[in-house]
Amino acid sequence: MADITAKVFKYDPSVDDAPTFVTYEVDWVDDESGIMSALQVLHAVNEQEQLGYDWCCHSGLCNRCSMRVDGKAGLACWTPIEPGEHTFEPLAGFPVIRDLVVDKSDAYDKLVSVDVSIKTSSPMTTAKAIDFDLYWNTLERLNMCRECMCCYSVCPKIQEEGLGGRFVGPTAMMGIAQRYLDTEDESDRLAQSVYAGIFECDLCGECNKVCPAYIGIADIIAKMQEDAEARGLKPGETPYELY
């Protein structure tokens, strides 16, 4: 008897009327780590029947294997699996291309739209020293964002309004935050965050729970909301409408 029962979401919108779940039996693979990942399970499933899923690095860096395993968004290559029954589904809130592969292009468009390149009034000709704590505990942490869009899949505001709403979403907002906290950037990133809908976030913290890079997304947004309100940038507190 197989050690793992994998219930896998199957759907090809080009030919299927509706999604279904197909069950596969997979043997446990034991190695020196003592851990079998969700991605290894999918590889075993794919040997039985062709499956639509995406992956590349196997090390939690490329973002391509983001999906829901047992209802929780995450990277399949980083999700440990124990013997028993497990469910594999695509990220919530994204159009399904096939099976576990979703179209994240609208979310990536939001990320590109915030333009996270450093803005300065004159060309940067030398590399300046950065405070160690600022670099290691803040900027480098933000730089570890996988852009996997797991946070988008659990954000109530995004799930409710879609990517056409005011809020650019957690990943794009962290791009703005990275430059707001960067002492080299000279643009008004705080005002940009307000235009990008930072006050639409209700700080539920669901994004924090699924971030593979362990970025405190809601905590950073809360700090920027506080700073924006202190500057009088909160919508309704200025003589003009920021939206």
Image (tube, grey):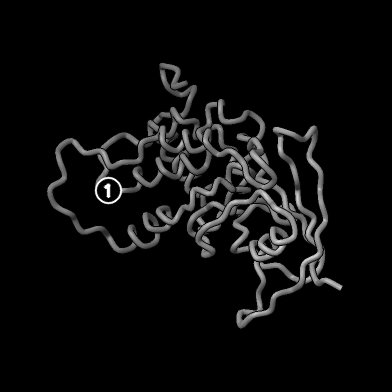
Residue reaching furthest to the left = 125
What amino acid is labelled 1 in the image? Answer: Thr
Q: Which residue is depicted at the point 64% across and 39% down?
A: 97
Which of these two is toward me, 154 or 48? 48
In the picture provided, is 171 more to the left or to the right than 210? left
In the picture provided, is 104 more to the left or to the right than 179? right
Image quarter of the N terminus: bottom right
Q: Is residue 164 visible?
A: yes
15 up-or-down from 240: above or below: below
For label 1, the residue is 183
Q: Position of residue 63 (x, y in %)?
A: 52, 53
224 up-or-down from 129: above or below: above
110 up-or-down from 100: above or below: above
31 up-or-down from 94: above or below: below
Q: Position of residue 138 (x, y in %)?
A: 39, 56
Q: Which residue is depicted at the point 56% across and 30% down?
A: 163
Q: Position of residue 201 (x, y in %)?
A: 56, 37
Quarter holding residue 111: top left
Q: Position of residue 159 (x, y in %)?
A: 65, 35
Q: How many marks?
A: 1
In the picture provided, is 9 more to the left or to the right than 162? right
Which of these two is toward me, 15 or 175? 15
Q: Dot 1, crowdedness within 10 Å: few (<14), some or many (≥20)?
A: few
Q: Which residue is depicted at the point 82% across and 71% down?
A: 2
Which of these two is toward me, 48 or 61? 48
